[in-house]
Image (spheres, rainbow, N blue to C red):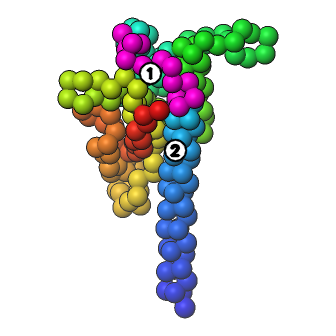
Amino acid sequence: MAIGLLGVAGLQLASVRYQQTSTLRTQALQHADFLIEKIRVNNSNLLSSNLAAALAAPETAYLAEDEYEDANTLPDDPSCGLAAQAACTPAQAAQRDLREWRQTLERELPGGRGSIFRVADGATVQPNARLVVVMWREKAELVTDNAAGADADEVVDETCPGDDPPPGIRCLNLWVSP
């Protein structure tokens, strides 16, 4: 009977761990979808004619090509669009959207950060397409298999941006072409 109860307790622990992982992945998808909808609504900066301006001021055209370590840097507050402030231009709205998105990711996901990359087909950049990446820290699956006092062996997610993504960080990558 005791062995059976220990088995049930182990199943319960595994269930809770996988439920937490599922919840974090669902939240990451919702945050990516939120930003993608903002990009679709405010897509006037994503035109071929605006590509040079987008590269000069990337945050105004939904670009924040950062690896995990730098993906929590907030763009300046454009001081528009809120009560008693002037309406935002499309570039200012993009900057505000990026700022608010990164603040929300940091607040709602463990180690939450986000980046937005240009999409290139060979040497040709597609000015209206973006790769939205949501990054967060996920608890290692085999955390209990470690020596006492040692750090968990964390998996490196190769889908994360950069040549050497940090271990334990999970990434969700979604393409958008408004």
Please tell me which residue lies in front, 82 or 19. 82
**In the image, which residues are magenta?**
39-52
**Quadrant of the image containing the N terminus:** bottom right
In front of the other: 155 or 115: 115
Is residue 48 located in the magenta-colored stretch of the structure? yes
Given the image, on which type of amino acid does mark 2 rest? Answer: Ala
User: Is 3 or 113 nearer to us in this picture?
Assistant: 113
Instruction: Return the x and y of residue 65 as percentages of the image width and height.
Output: 37, 24
Q: Position of residue 82 (x, y in %)?
A: 73, 17
SS at badge 2: helix
Which percent across, then down, holds residue 122? 20, 29
- Which corner quadrant of the image does residue 58 belong to? top left
**Residue at the image point whose x is 54% and y is 61% from the top:** 19
Of mark 1 and mark 2, the one earlier in the sequence is 2
Q: Which mark is residue 101?
A: none
Instruction: Single out the residue that lies furthest toward the right.
Output: 84
Q: Give the labeled residue for mark 1.
A: 46
Disc 1 on helix, strand or loop?
Answer: loop
The residue singled out by tag 2 in the image is: 28
Q: Residue at x 56, y 44 (%)?
A: 30
Q: Can residue 127 be seen?
A: yes
**In this picture, is 122 found above or below 166?**
above
* Number of disc labels: 2
Using a 10 Å C-alpha cutoff, classify the residue at mark 1 as few (fewer than 14 neighbours), some (14 to 19) or many (20 or more): many
Q: Quadrant of residue 77?
A: top right
User: Quick check: is 72 in the magenta stretch?
Assistant: no
Q: Nearer the viewer, residue 48 or 173?
A: 48
The three-letter code of the residue at mark 1 reads: Leu
Q: Residue at x 52, y 29 (%)?
A: 39
